[in-house]
Image (cartoon, rainbow, N blue to C red):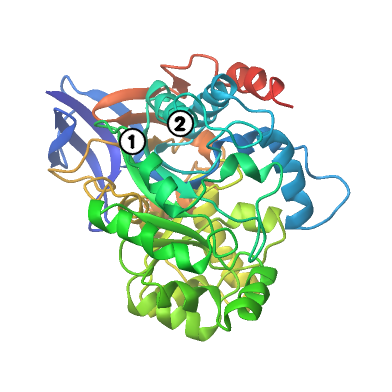
Amino acid sequence: MNGWWCEQAWLPSGVVARNVRIDVSEGRITAVTPDRPAGDARRLSGLTLPGFANAHSHAFHRALRGRTQQGGGTFWTWREQMYAVAGRLDPDTHLALARATYAEMALAGITCVGEFHYLHHQPGGSPYDQPNAMGEVLIQAAAEAGIRITLLDTCYLAGGIGRALEEPQLRFGDRAAASWAERAAALSTSDTARIGAALHSVRAVPADQIAQIVEWAGVRQAPLHVHLSEQVAENEQCLAAYGMTPTQLLADRGALGPRTVAVHGTHLTQGDIALLGSGGTGVCLCPTTERDLADGIGPARRLATAGSPLSLGSDSHAVIDLLEEARAVELDERLSTQERGHFDPRELLEMATAAGHAALGWPAAGRLEPGALADFTTVRLDGPRTAGAGDHAAETIVFAATGADVTGVVVDGREVVRDGRHLLVPDVARALEEAIGAVT
């Protein structure tokens, strides 16, 4: 049995308790006891929270950071730059880049990632000898970086509504949903890796192929994720082709519900919001990417009020910082309404922790309580951004701290980050520099 002593800990009640001992056995929390002396437990100075869940990631996009900021443009021009990087990756470079990116996530307090994976085949579309080579290296990368992963294997069949795949999309695509399902079924799992499904979008999956993906996920009780209404153009194209919004199309094909997570949901009608909320469909918001790509500000408060659980993702990795994603949800609402106080700190932390883990199929993670998975993150309270927090530690961390203030990370009862250093990838910056240099 391992024991950790937390100077302060954020408990499921929303209360910040002091002098909290967390006991762990076989990767599970066995006891959480406030007002205890440290004894022989490992000391964690600062505020300890459940590990953060990054519910939407494209690991290879990390290579684009800082390289897409010149010349203006839109999401669609950025996409061409993304395609160029995608075309250069192979299993070895994909592994190196993903491992370094996941290690950066661990340094920022992320203990679980949802990898929305569509980079399946060789350039030109020919399968690898091992058809899941590119997906298996992502699972390997997460293990080597010390975090959990839900590999959201993504069905990608079309280059747009009514359009065939073109270079470099050919390496994303399977021939049909049945071919995708056969390949995805061969992916392996472990104690720290699970497999979910994704349909890339209504642009990339024809309407008559959606049901098979939904069935595949349903049989396995697996998460089902989908990019939804990130761009106005997607809505316009869907209305023109099918006479309904993307949300309505998904509802019509049985793709919504409590195991489904819609990513972005930036441009939704009030009817779309009602459809998502009434069935408990989750929505993953990615504010730093949505603002970097000029996507827009999604209707977060209206979605939550309608009944959609909200989670968070760093998506394109313009930055990797779940605290920044969390506060951006509230601050973007303030900008769009000119009023404050749409989400309280507890709600924002729930998005970054329990709701994110649930969205990825890990409902036992995301809470500091007996029986939960032993995944937790400690944020310092003595740094320049957090000093003086006093009795407002949670509020200070949500609205002022960054991933750079994370000092400790435990995953499955094992230390991954100690004193701000990654214990499995000793020089994360160098690993990133080498991996990015190999594909740019």
Identity of the residue drawn at 60% across and 56% down? 158
Compared with 258, 193 (above or below) is above
Residue 268 appears in which quarter of the rendering?
A: bottom right
Residue bearing mark 2? 131
Q: Report helix, strand or loop for mark 1.
A: loop
- Position of 246 with respect to 376 (left or right) is right
Q: Identify the amino acid type marked 2.
A: Pro
Between residues 276 and 336, which one lies in front from this camera angle? 276
Q: Identify the amino acid type marked 1.
A: Ala
Local crowd size for mark 1, using a 10 Å CA cut-off: few (<14), some (14–19), many (≥20): few
Q: In x, y percent, where is residue 141?
A: 45, 25
Question: N-terminal of the two: label 1 or label 2?
Answer: 2
The numbered mark at residue 140 is none
Compared with 366, 304 (above or below) is below
Identity of the residue drawn at 80% across and 45% down? 69
Residue bearing mark 1? 186
Identity of the residue drawn at 38% across and 71% down? 308
Q: Report helix, strand or loop for mark 2.
A: loop
- Position of 289 with respect to 271 (left or right) is right
Q: Residue furthest right?
A: 71
User: Which image quadrant: the N terminus?
Assistant: top left
Label pair 1/2, CB-CB below 8 angstroms: yes
